Image: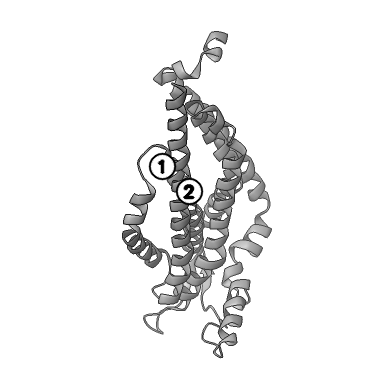
Amino acid sequence: MKDKKNKDKDEMSFLDHVEELRWHLVRSTLAIFVFGIIAFLMKGFIFDNIIFAPKNPNFITYRFFCSVSKFFGADGLCITEIPFKFQSLAMGEQFSVHIWTSITVGIILAFPFIVWEFWKFISPGLYEKERKGAKTFIIISSFLFFVGVLFGYFIITPLSINFLGNYSVSDLVARNIKIGSYISLMRSTVLASGLIFELPIVMYFLTKMGIVTPEFLKTYRKHALVVILMLAAIITPPDIISQIIVTIPIMGLYEISIYISKIVLKKERKKKESDGETA
């Protein structure tokens, strides 16, 4: 048993790697479980002050857009009412919503630990200098994820709720929204936004693996813009203002990714040159 633990990770078999991955996944799941329990016990605060907050016309995002609108001499972005009510149609729906919301909160809060476990799994295949960048990697990736989550919660979610909550095909249709549908929209939006903001990290690794280059990213910048606009059209209401608000930061992340790719490629070339001189 000790021999197996002390075995050089460069010589680990496929099954050893699978076993190693399994324990990383187990520890990550335990972290999600712990934070999920904490979220489950904080039901009142999470639902009343966080989940249902964007339903209130006095939500900070609506007040901000209203202030911006008035600054330009109009009040078209001011929200006075979001005319729909929540309803629960199934016996266990509220309990199910409570469970899945707790799991989602657990995933968000445990994200830095999950990233740490991911880093520990891939670090044996990295150079010694790259292994020393663990703290930087965890801090940057966690920061980007949390910024994305906040962007999804404070920007995309309110825009979607306001549009969909006010949209009606006829006055004969009552606006009674299932609580599960509302929270599903928020959950998918927030998590998707958090993952999208990891784009620079993804590009870093793709560049390290030689899959993408700065030139490649520049060449397909226009194609990326089209894809981002399509993505913005999917996750936001079908109005130009909402799509622009979502597109701008994602394009900014794409430009940052190009810069990161340049740095990575430059370091790789310097390393090859130094290795060649040493040889």
Residue 172 vertical placement versus 193 (above, below): below
Marker count (numbered) = 2
Residue 214 vertical placement versus 137 (above, below): below
State how far apart marks 2 and 1 are (Cα): 9 Å
Q: Which mark is residue 187?
A: none
In this image, 196 relative to 142: left or right? Answer: left
**Residue 203 visible in the picture:** yes
Q: Which residue is at a point 50% across and 66% down the rendered structure image?
A: 156
Q: Nearer the viewer, residue 8 or 168?
A: 8
Q: Which residue carries the number 1 mark?
A: 207
What percent of the width, then of the height, locates residue 49?
66, 64
Local crowd at mark 1 within 10 Å, few (<14), some, or many (≥20)?
Answer: many
SS class, disc 2: helix
Q: Are marks 2 and 1 in contact (CB under 8 Å)?
A: yes
Position of the N terminus by quadrant: top right
In this image, 200 relative to 147: left or right? Answer: left
What percent of the width, then of the height, locates residue 21?
48, 28
Local crowd at mark 2 within 10 Å, few (<14), some, or many (≥20)?
Answer: some
Q: Which residue carries the number 2 mark?
A: 260
